[in-house]
Image (cartoon, rainbow, N blue to C red):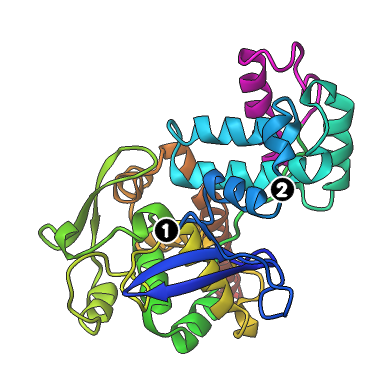
């Protein structure tokens, strides 16, 4: 991820450390302040703002910025890492817009104005509204507001989602991705698991030719077969304890940090300009469907609900149905011409 101005990362003995120093590298450099080790947590950003001199936010207990920090600290105890990351990213929009203002002054009209400003990215707008609903509910229970900040605000309709990869994109990734990024890509492509599970998969999960794992997000236990193509790829990977996907320093990945590193690699491959790693989840389902597996079988393998698998397979099934129809029409046309 791109670090804020004045923040720098230091690697030492396989670990990462973060520091803030205003004017670093100049004659007017300020004091060097140690920050928490994970920039994806609310504690990191609280410490950063204090180091930057925004201590007034700690005093003004009813500001939007302080409410966001309070909510995220509470949510960290009850939601998963991926959900918390998404909430923090969405609520940063609210912080930037109204941070120093009293949270009691935020009205649905203000939230709608932000939504309208995000109209070109409806997915981002929906995520923002979802996070604001969570913040609003929490703020009411803390007696910070007495009315919902999102009452009557409707989400934008989505016309798509994370798109499956094309064969050309898969081929480009197989051709150009290297190292741990390639390993993560192959695990995504051939297992259909979420990123939070991909970064934890390791040799200890192998059970009779498949991965036996308990999904981080759902708690669902799944057995995912290791297909021959993936097995051949895994045979070339370094043998070491722990997860397959680790950083060069040996430190483990979070799902979001791996996404960041994948995006950096993706920028160098034009064919992958608009792909997402989550799109490989849909791609894996479609590939299993093309291989002849039923929807319930895919649901068991990927640990997805039947409805999700059906949604992912819908276009693939229609496309296959259309191809079959073309073949049938061509056979009928040929037979008719022979009769003539």
Name the residue carrying label 2.
Answer: 124
Crowdedness of circle 1 by 10 Å Cα count: few (<14), some, many (20+)? many
Residue 250 drawn at (x, y percent): 31, 73
Residue 92 drawn at (x, y percent): 70, 46
Q: Does residue 108 appear anywhere in the picture?
A: yes
> On the image, which quarter does residue 145 sit in?
top right
Mark 1 vs 2, N-terminal side: 2
Name the residue carrying label 1.
Answer: 254
Measured in 3D between alpha carbons, the distance from the residue under mark 1 to the one under mark 2, in whole angstroms, is 22 Å
Q: Does residue 107 appear anywhere in the picture?
A: no
> On the image, which quarter does residue 24 sit in?
bottom right
Q: Nearer the viewer, residue 306 or 180?
A: 180
User: In the visual, does 124 lie left or right of 9?
Assistant: right
Residue 18 drawn at (x, y percent): 51, 64
User: In the visual, does 134 lie left or right of 176?
Assistant: right
Query: Is 18 above or below relative to 63?
Result: below
Residue 131: within the magenta?
yes
Crowdedness of circle 2 by 10 Å Cα count: few (<14), some, many (20+)? some
Q: Residue at horizontal 52%, vertical 84%?
A: 172
Span highlighted in magenta in the image: 126-154
Query: Is 92 above or below relative to 278?
Result: above
Residue 19: within the magenta?
no
Instruction: Quadrant for the C terminus, please.
Output: bottom right
User: Label 2's element?
Assistant: helix
User: Label 1's element?
Assistant: loop
Query: Is 182 above or below relative to 254?
Result: below
Residue 37 drawn at (x, y percent): 45, 58
Circle 1 or circle 2, nearest the eye: 1
Instruction: Quadrant for the N terminus, please.
Output: bottom right
Residues at circles 1 and 2 in contact by the CB criterion of under 8 Å: no
Q: Residue at horizontal 25%, vertical 46%?
A: 222
């Amino acid at each position: 991820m791109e670090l804020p101005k004045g923040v720098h990362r230091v690697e030492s003995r396989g670990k990462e450390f973060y520091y803030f120093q205003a004017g670093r590298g100049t004659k007017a450099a300020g004091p060097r302040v140690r920050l928490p080790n994970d920039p994806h947590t609310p504690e990191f950003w609280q410490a950063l703002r204090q180091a930057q001199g925004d201590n007034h936010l700690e005093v003004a207990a009813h500001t939007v910025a302080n409410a966001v920090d309070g909510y995220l600290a509470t949510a960290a105890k009850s939601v998963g890492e991926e959900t918390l990351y998404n909430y923090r990213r969405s609520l940063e929009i609210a912080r930037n817009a109204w941070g120093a203002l009293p949270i009691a002054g935020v009205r649905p009209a203000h939230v709608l104005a932000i939504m309208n400003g995000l109209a070109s990215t409806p997915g981002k707008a929906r995520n923002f509204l979802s996070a604001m609903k969570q913040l609003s509910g929490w703020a009411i229970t803390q007696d910070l507001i007495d009315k919902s900040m999102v009452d009557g605000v409707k989400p934008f309709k989505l016309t798509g989602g994370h798109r499956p990869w094309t064969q050309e994109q898969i081929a480009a990734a197989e051709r150009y991705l290297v190292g741990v990024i390639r390993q993560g890509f192959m695990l995504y492509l051939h297992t259909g698991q979420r990123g939070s599970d991909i970064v934890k998969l390791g040799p200890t999960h192998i059970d009779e030719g498949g991965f036996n794992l308990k999904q981080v997000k759902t708690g669902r236990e799944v057995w995912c077969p290791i297909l021959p193509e993936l097995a051949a790829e895994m045979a070339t990977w370094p043998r070491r304890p722990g997860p397959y996907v680790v950083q060069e320093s040996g430190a483990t990945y979070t799902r979001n940090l791996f996404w960041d590193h994948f995006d950096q690699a993706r920028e160098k491959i034009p064919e992958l300009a608009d792909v997402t790693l989550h799109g490989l989840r849909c791609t894996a389902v479609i590939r299993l469907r093309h291989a002849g597996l039923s929807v319930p079988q895919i649901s068991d393998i990927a640990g997805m609900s039947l409805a999700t698998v059906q949604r992912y397979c819908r276009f693939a099934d229609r496309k296959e149905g259309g191809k079959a129809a073309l073949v049938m029409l061509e056979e009928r046309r040929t037979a008719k011409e022979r009769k003539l």
